[in-house]
Image (cartoon, rainbow, N blue to C red):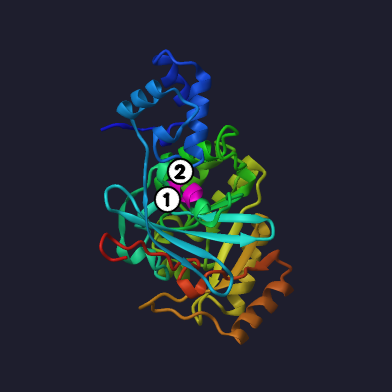
């Protein structure tokens, strides 16, 4: 099998070119082409033909197939279903904001975290995605809309910290000034709370925004919603978040989906506020996005109002996040990659 060249960092690529007796600047040219979505070496018109042929013998370029594209009528959000070379699939979402284009990408085909409110969890985990497959979602998704992504959120299918090495490699590639050049402060990574991996991530001091999918302030409720909590626990998770902030100086964001009569009581809001205020982070609220066959319902207007009243009284720093892409099942928790033949 040929080496996956798009999953190589610019430094690794330069070292490979030196081994072949080629100048380093050629590696920079190829790296840029790959970061712009080139699907073949023949498309790299400023590379000598002989070198292109040699590269084609040694290296492969990932070429996901776009099986389905949908655009939300309400807000213009787009959702893409990608099929990778082995037939596994994942979805990505493109969202347009006043501050630029955001690519919400998947890091796994499926997920093994088992969160009870998430459509992705229903199918389990097929496999991790490579760095190149993550980059493809950013670059090719932008090409479909005729724009370049300026922001990235790793909040699609899968748990990023469960695919730690490939995600870290992707971050290095997409942030490289010679390629996509998307700075770490324009990237958010969402985790369900793998505390040991959060601590490991903090060692790299990447300056991205860490978002923790919290969804409950107590162990009993959170363990019902998110099986990972039976291993970590809420207090341990907040301790890990505090360590991340201390190591990186980057404020942690806590995601909280309001679920009717599960996690939307004022008493839970007060407990949540105490924990978030102590940790010094920011709270992002949203009502649950419904999924087909799901057992939970989003909180109603009155319960949301009472929850917010309790948060305001506790003076917690929070935002009620706008929903995008709900009419095409592109909102948080709604992604589910179809298998081959099910698109």
Q: Earlier in the sequence, mark 1 or mark 2?
A: 1
What residue do we see at 40% from left, 65% from top?
115
In this view of the protein, can residue 49 be seen by the observer?
Answer: yes
Which corner quadrant holds the N terminus?
top left
Question: Are there few (<14), some (14-19), or many (20+) residues within 10 Å of tag 2?
Answer: many
Q: Disc 1 on helix, strand or loop?
A: loop
What residue do we see at 56% from left, 63% from top?
255
Vertical comparison of 177 with 330: above or below? above
Q: Nearer the viewer, residue 247 or 47?
A: 47
Q: Disc 2 on helix, strand or loop?
A: helix
Vertical comparison of 101 with 71: above or below? above
Q: Which x, y percent locates residue 143?
A: 51, 51
**Res. 107 mark:** 1
Vertical comparison of 330 with 5: above or below? below
In this view of the protein, can residue 236 be seen by the observer?
Answer: no
Q: Is residue 154 magenta?
A: no
Overall secondary structure of the magenta stretch?
helix
**Res. 167 mark:** 2
Q: Which x, y percent locates residue 312?
A: 72, 73
Which corner quadrant holds the C terminus?
bottom left
Contact between marks 1 and 2 (CB within 8 A): the answer is: yes
Q: Which x, y percent locates residue 67?
A: 36, 59
Q: Which x, y percent locates residue 305?
A: 65, 82
What residue do we see at 37% from left, 37% from top?
61
Distance between the Cα atoms at labels 1 and 2?
Answer: 7 Å
**Res. 83 mark:** none
Q: Is residue 137 magenta?
A: yes
Q: Nearer the viewer, residue 224 or 157?
A: 157
The magenta-colored residue range is 134-140
Q: Residue furthest top?
A: 21
Q: Quadrant of residue 206?
A: top right
């Amino acid at each position: 099998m040929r080496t996956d060249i798009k999953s190589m960092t610019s430094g690794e690529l330069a070292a490979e070119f030196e081994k072949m007796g080629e100048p380093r600047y050629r590696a920079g040219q190829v790296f840029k082409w790959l970061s712009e979505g080139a699907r073949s070496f023949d498309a790299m018109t400023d590379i000598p033909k002989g070198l292109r042929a040699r590269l084609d013998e040694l290296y492969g370029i990932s070429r996901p197939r776009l099986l389905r594209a949908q655009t939300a009528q309400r807000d213009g959000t787009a959702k893409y279903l990608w099929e990778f070379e082995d037939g596994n699939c994942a979805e990505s979402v493109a969202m347009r904001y006043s501050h630029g284009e955001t690519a919400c990408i998947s890091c796994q085909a499926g997920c093994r975290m088992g969160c009870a409110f998430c459509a992705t969890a229903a199918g389990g985990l097929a496999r991790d995605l490579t760095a190149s497959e993550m980059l493809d979602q950013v670059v090719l998704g932008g090409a479909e809309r005729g724009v370049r992504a300026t922001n990235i959120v790793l909040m699609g299918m899968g748990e990023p910290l469960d695919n730690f090495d490939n995600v870290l490699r992707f971050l290095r590639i997409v942030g490289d000034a010679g390629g996509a050049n998307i700075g770490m402060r324009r990237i958010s990574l969402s985790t369900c709370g793998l505390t040991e991996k959060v601590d490991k991530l903090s060692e790299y001091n990447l300056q991205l925004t860490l978002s923790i999918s919290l969804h409950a302030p107590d162990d009993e409720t959170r363990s019902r919603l998110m099986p990972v909590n039976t291993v970590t626990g809420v207090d341990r998770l907040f301790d890990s978040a505090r360590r991340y902030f201390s190591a990186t100086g980057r404020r942690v964001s806590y995601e909280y989906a309001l679920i009717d009569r599960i996690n939307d009581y004022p008493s839970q809001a007060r407990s949540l506020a105490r924990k978030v205020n102590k940790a010094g982070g920011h709270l992002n609220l949203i009502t649950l996005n419904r999924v087909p066959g799901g057992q939970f319902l989003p909180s109603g207007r009155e319960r949301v109002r009472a929850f917010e009243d309790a948060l305001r009284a506790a003076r917690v720093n929070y935002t009620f996040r706008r929903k995008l892409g709900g009419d095409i099942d592109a909102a948080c928790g709604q992604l589910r990659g179809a298998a081959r033949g099910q698109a």
